[in-house]
Amino acid sequence: MTTASRALRLGTRASRLARWQTAHIAAALRGRHEGLGCTEVTVSTEGDRDDRTPLPEIGGKGVFTEALEAALRSGEIDVAVHSLKDVPVEATPGLVLAALCFRADPRDVVIARGGHTLATLPAGARVGTCSNRRSAQLLALRPDLQLLPLRGNVDTRVRKAQDGEYDAIVIAAAGVGRLGLADAVTEYLPLDQVLPAPGQGALAVQCRADDADVLALLRDLDDPDVRATTEAERGFLEGLGGGCAAPIAAHARVEESPAGRRVLVRGVVASLDGRVVIRVATVGGADRARQTGLALAAEARARGADSLL
């Protein structure tokens, strides 16, 4: 594909956040490839069509990605833009995550009326979340909380908190920030209290593995640090056999050392009621990030993680 030959078709979900993310990728591509045309193609996913059923009950894996991947395989689109945390760790035959990039704040946030933080919420407060991972870690800190299912787009969830449908909600900082809603945040949850979903905050740009032209276009978007950290986190998830609905969390960061670039990974596996929390951490070479995550998963298994999954 030459930049002047035809527009690159970018597949996206219909939500405002998904379209923001896709527009961000399109702008980055146009900035790197003069004359490149980009068009947006909206694809309806299972997770969008059913915005009431809690995600763990829908099935978790692929509910936001399968339709986009099908559109890629059929040739309806050239590129799919995903939130990386929604992408299953199992590779999809014929497709590749060509760029992992633009990672925003990976933390979770509290949004509560009255300026409450997690610690200051009243006993028995009604807290909305769409994640078993969040629920388990929140209950480990505040076993008195009443956790309620929370679905809908980011805008909808924030409005539900502000309108008093919940005493508070806990959602990803990245989406809140990208949509300009950070003023609603009452607390950014520290990573030593609540670890995020593997890959949270990062964007994934997917294309067909045999599409050399598109692969060449996307290569410049790939961020080595984002790839190393998220591959370590997703390696941890992969090694535990978990999906989006599992009570598994991980966070990694890259640091320079005399021996070269290293990735430091922390992981959590918890019981759904928060009564048992297994915390593990390790360090490995950034060039072996996935293997480092897999090794950390093996450590969690040795400490009893299987009984919690």
Image (cartoon, rainbow, N blue to C red):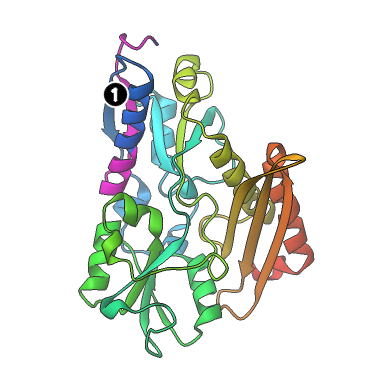
**Looking at the picture, how far across and down is residue 44, in whole percent?**
30, 43
Would you identify the image quadrant in which residue 78 lies?
Answer: top left
Residue shown at the point (29%, 23%) measured from the top left: 38
Region rendered in magenta: 2-21
Residue shown at the point (48%, 24%) measured from the top left: 220
Q: Is residue 181 above or below residue 212?
A: below
Tell me the quarter of the image containing the N terminus: top left
Tell me the quarter of the image containing the C terminus: bottom right
Residue 39 lies in magenta, yes or no? no
Whether residue 15 is visible here, answered yes or no, is no
Q: Is residue 151 left or right of residue 248?
A: left
**Which of the two residues, 309 or 167, is positioned nearer the viewer here?**
167
**Which of the two residues, 109 or 64, is positioned nearer the viewer here?**
109
Q: Residue furthest front?
A: 258
Quick one: SS at disc 1? Answer: strand
**Looking at the picture, how far across and down is residue 282, in whole percent?**
73, 56
Q: Is residue 223 left or right of residue 262?
A: left
Q: Residue furthest right?
A: 302
Query: Which residue was labeled with disc 1?
Result: 38
Whether residue 14 is visible here, answered yes or no, is yes
**Looking at the picture, how far across and down is residue 22, in whole percent?**
33, 36
Q: Is residue 222 left or right of residue 300?
A: left
